[in-house]
């Protein structure tokens, strides 16, 4: 079971994984060693999946976001395995989700410019058969992040 200090530690780590154990301990009113033990326990229990650096997309040269909505006529395990492998090999595809509703999949694609989407599209359709693809260009980011709510954690 997580308590409020565990949740606060997780929340703070989501904001900035570079925080030192000393800073975390101070913010959650724990001793350095007690805070360190909690962090280790949270990591070993799998609450902290990994610590990453979030890069500036502008400085990395990929400021454009395109969402590709995909319909397929194929739903076999073999087709899905091929599709997973194809999209895994394309670094511009940063997220992929299987959906309910009118489309089967949505891909989040980051690009240097919108015209580069055609390159990615061709990489996919050369290797896997799709029924329909519709792309939408993100005009503005209203909210972005990887943080998840900590209140529901068990």
Image (cartoon, grey):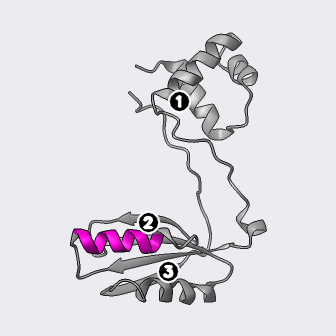
Q: Up-down: is 21 above or below 152?
A: above
Q: Is residue 143 visible?
A: yes
Q: Quadrant of the C terminus?
A: top left
Q: Secondary structure at mark 1?
A: helix
Q: Which quadrant would residue 24 be assigned to in this image?
A: top right
39, above or below 133, in the image: above
| Residue 87 left/right relative to 78 | right
Q: Say whether residue 44 is magenta.
A: no
User: Alpha-carbon distance for marks 2 and 1?
Assistant: 26 Å
- Which residue bears the numbered disc 1? 43
Q: Residue 79: x percent and y percent?
A: 28, 75
Q: Which residue is mark 3?
A: 136
Query: Label 1 crowding class (10 Å Cα cut-off): few <14, some 14-19, many 20+?
Result: some
Q: Could you say which is closer to the camera, residue 3 or residue 131? A: 131
**From mark 3 to mark 2, how far is it between C-alphas?**
15 Å
Mark in front: 3 vs 2: 2
Circle nearer the N terminus (3, 2):
2
Residue shown at the point (68%, 53%) measured from the top left: 54
Q: Secondary structure at mark 3?
A: strand
Q: Which residues are magenta?
A: 77-87
**Magenta stretch encompasses residue 86:** yes
The x and y percentages for residue 13 are: 63, 34
- Which residue is under mark 2? 96
Cβ atoms at labels 3 and 2 below 8 Å apart: no
Disc number lying in front (2 or 1): 1
| Nearest to viewer (mark 3 / mark 1) | 1
Q: Is residue 129 above or below residue 15?
A: below
Q: Is residue 30 visible?
A: no
Mark 2 or 1 closer to N-term? 1
Q: In front: 7, or 80?
A: 80
Instruction: Residue at 73% x, 37% y: name it.
Output: 18
């Amino acid at each position: 079971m997580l308590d409020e200090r565990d949740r606060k530690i997780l929340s703070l780590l989501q904001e900035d994984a570079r925080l030192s154990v000393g800073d975390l301990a101070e913010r959650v009113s724990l001793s350095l060693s007690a805070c360190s033990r909690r962090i280790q326990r949270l990591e070993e229990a799998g609450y902290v999946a990994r610590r990453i650096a979030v890069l500036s997309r502008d400085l990395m040269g990929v400021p454009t976001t395109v969402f590709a909505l995909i319909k397929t006529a194929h739903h076999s395990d073999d087709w899905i395995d091929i599709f997973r492998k194809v999209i895994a090999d394309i670094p511009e595809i940063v997220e992929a989700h299987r959906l309910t509703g009118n489309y089967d999949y949505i891909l989040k694609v980051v690009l240097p410019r919108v015209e580069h989407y055609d390159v990615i599209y061709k990489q996919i359709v050369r290797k896997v058969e799709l029924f329909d693809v519709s792309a939408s260009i993100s005009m503005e980011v209203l909210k972005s992040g990887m943080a998840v709510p900590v209140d529901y954690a068990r």
